[in-house]
Image: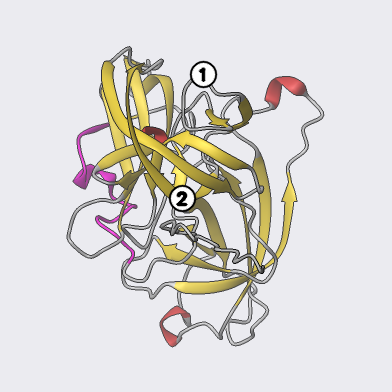
Amino acid sequence: MKKLLLLLFVPIVSLGQMDYYVSAKGGLNVREAPEANAKKASTLSYGTFVSIESRTAIKLTLNDTDKETGVKNQIEGEWVEIVSENNISGYVFDGYLVAFKPHPWTIFTTVSGTSLNLKNTDLNTPEIKISYTISTMFYKNLKVGEIVQLVTDDKDLPNLEFRVTSVEKVKYEDYDLVPDCCDEYNVEAKILKNIPDKYSGLNKEKINGLVIHPPVKEVKFLVDPNNPSQEMSFAITTDGIPYALNGTTFFNLLDFDDDGNPDFRSFQECIKVSQLTDGRFYCELNGGGKQILIDNKWVVFTSWSPM
């Protein structure tokens, strides 16, 4: 007598796109089963891309303390099956997974300072180049051939696009100079199209600006970066850089979505101001950095700012 083999297929909801990143600064454990006592398969580092392959509906609540602020809160979520960008699979608590595509910018957007040299440059050639340094805790590999966007500090000039020609990790011979926050990468790029007519005839040796990757369509400075007094009151330090008389100064404010509010900002923290004998002011700094607005929360790119 012939036996009938019956195969039962159990459907699993598969989301399958890497639309999340790990937000646990100490890393997120991957388990072989959806329970806290299951064998640990691996640990995903902060900022790792993951896709949620299926949800278990097994709920979990954790008590969490922010190591930087000391703030305690409860995080609710469930066990989910994931695959990471480096092909690690298993189960994780989704309270430490954050969706990163609600906007055209994410924590992996990079913003860096640079300048466009206009002196002795033929503005009608496609050989115009820029160079800059990426410094961010959330860096994802920038590849040769990708497009970056230059937003100049002159609000009357249109933004420019450049194609990346080289990316090299910065190597420090002096260990004391290595940043605590992140790796650094030197980038060079060449203009994608001929420079617009508005740039021709400018009586300037260079134009300063910010380089954004990936490009953000509507990006613009909220105020004139050359007149920071529009943002708050300032004292002038010995090196001529404007800072607030005390507290935190925000500058380089960028609006990504044309709503009139900042989505990116640089900041410096001034803890003490002293007046010099020549009348100028000296500001003692307590750090600074760059922040980007994600889901109505300011996320710090770095613990210091090169701009």
Q: Name the residue at 40% across, 34% down.
A: 96
Residue 8 higher or lower than 97, as above or below: below
Horizontal side of residue 265 vs 40, given as left or right? left
Residue 137 higher or lower than 210, as above or below: above
Looking at the rendered image, the disc whose residue lies closer to the viewer, 1 or 2, is 1
Circle on res. 37: 1
Quarter of the image where the N terminus is located? bottom right
- Which residue is the extreme one toward the right? 173
Q: CA distance from mark 1 to mark 2?
A: 21 Å
Horizontal side of residue 205 vs 80, given as left or right? right
Residue 244 seen in the figure: no
Circle on res. 151: none
- Crowd tier of the residue under label 1, counting other residues whose Cα lies within 10 Å: few below 14, some 14–19, many 20 or above: few
Horizontal side of residue 156 vs 203, given as left or right? left
Task: Please give the range of residues in magenta.
Answer: 219-235
Q: What residue did someone put label 2 on?
A: 52
